[in-house]
Amino acid sequence: MATTLITGGTVVNATGTGDADVLIDGETIVAVLAPGSTLLGHDLARSVDTVVDATGKYVIPGGIDAHTHMEMPFGGTFASDTFETGTRAAAIGGTTSIVDFVVQYPEQNILEQYHAWHEKAAGNCAIDYGFHQILSDVQDSSLTAMDELITEGVTSFKLFMAYKGVFLSDDGQILRAFQKGADNGAMMMMHAENGAIIDVLVQQALEAGKTTPYYHGISRPWQAEEEATHRAIMIADLTGAPLYVVHVSAKQAVEQIAAARDRGLNVFGETCPQYLYLSLEDQLGAVSEEWGDFEGAKWVCSTPLRSKHEGHQHHMWQSLRTNDIQMVSTDHCPFCMKDQKDMGIGNFAKIPNGIGSVEHRMDLMYQGFVSGQITLPRWVELTSTTPARMFGMYGKKGVIQPGADGDVVVYDPNGHTSIGVGKTHHMNMDYSAWEGFEIDGHVDTVVSRGKVVVDGGSYLGSKGDGRYIKRGLSQYLV
Ligand code: DUC
Ligand code: ZN
Ligand code: ZN
């Protein structure tokens, strides 16, 4: 078994920072040692197979992106990253685990879909991967499938309050699924937007000739998000199920989550980099020679970007500090402009919803530390430790400690990362939603279960390095 020593760096865990060397034996961290320690008289640097010099750099647990949609069939097409391209990009960006969503459309067999996702991912992933399960029509068979999937390590289930005829579950269906979650310990995840309201507003906008991408956001107002978040919380309260609200973008939805937590409910919230950095006005102002005012399609996602005049971004950063929102995932759901997003020219409702960010989440959130919004340990907590705990992986993932998987990132605070298609972009997209973003830091080395898969920014891994993560129940639940 190969041994690796990461030496001279500052180890950052969610609990704090300290100078230490990290010794990995095979796939597992076996020791976190005072800098320059010997072990039983042996000079470690001379005894190991690989030494990674992390002098002046941060040594952090590998990022965990708990919300991705690789190859997702959606909006009349497929998300453009395969498990191969998406996980490679993730690795290059310092993410060593993803949790992807198995899709069930109405009338599809849930367990067949689960096996289909294994077939897509197995042998293709650069990093470790787990699955959540989407439930689109809750029937008796769905409830028994939930029990079976838990034994397979799929311990979280996502429902939708929007996308009628595609994903939407009505309140009765949600109630039944949540009752099952309360019973078997599953984490219930919710896309919280009021779909009926949105569908009418979309229709009215199109009839009024408002067809450009900007109207996607206008027809998905924060009230629709707040109302659905509140309703999901009420159903969680009624049933006793834990609730995890995905991609929270509106400050009013954050307030609903905070109030529920103050009442002692197991309610959790996730946001994404796009809601921390981008606004509806940025989307409105985006016009290019190539795409004209269709340029804004690059940022069509749901929940949508919010207006910068309403204080959402500021509130979202604040909620990351106060723990009203507990973690940051990407909702990585990439589509190219050409032959995918362009299906919505003349009708914003036909633009496939999604933004690709899996490669940039660690950098974008590090910039939150640079700008004084969060501390270094909080950076690690939001992007790795809490995702591990939330979704039953902590101990193996999300922490640098003996016994944990050797998933380690060496991050250079003196490095620099310019984001964009022609610069650092490895996702399978013909544009970047983050074009022109400059980061005061750099992912230098990435170790995934003991294997150096990125060195000096270059990818050294291969497809199939990643292994399925059989997850346990959420470690936030007693
Ligand atoms: N939102 C997106 O932007 N894409 C995929 C599904 C979703 O809910
Ligand atoms: Zn969603
Ligand atoms: Zn999603």
Image (cartoon, rainbow, N blue to C red):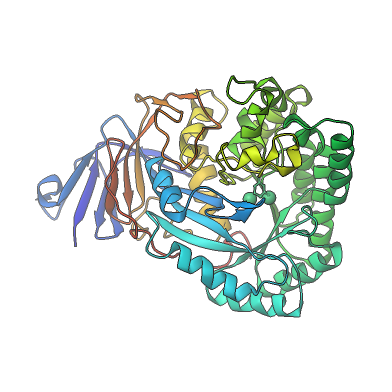
Query: Looking at the image, which is closer to me, 446 or 73?
Result: 73
Left or right: 302 in relation to 154: right
Q: Is residue 285 above or below residue 389?
A: above
The quarter of the image holding the N terminus is bottom left
Query: Looking at the image, which is closer to me, 196 or 193?
Result: 196
Residue at 37 percent of width and 42 percent of height = 92
Residue at 84 percent of width and 54 percent of height = 231
Residue at 43 percent of width and 65 percent of height = 468
The quarter of the image holding the C terminus is bottom right
Residue at 53 percent of width and 23 percent of height = 371
Residue 94 locus on image (x, y percent): 40, 42
Query: Looking at the image, which is closer to me, 439 or 434?
Result: 434
Residue 369 locus on image (x, y percent): 50, 29
Left or right: 336 in relation to 106: left
Q: Is residue 131 above or below residue 9?
A: below
Left or right: 335 in relation to 308: left
Instruction: Report if residue 37 is visible in the image.
Output: no
> To which quarter of the image does residue 111 belong?
bottom right
Circle count: 0
> To which quarter of the image does residue 417 belong?
top left
Left or right: 181 in relation to 433: right
Q: Is residue 71 above or below residue 364?
A: below
Instruction: Report if residue 314 is visible in the image.
Output: yes
Residue 459 locus on image (x, y percent): 30, 43
Residue 95 locus on image (x, y percent): 43, 46
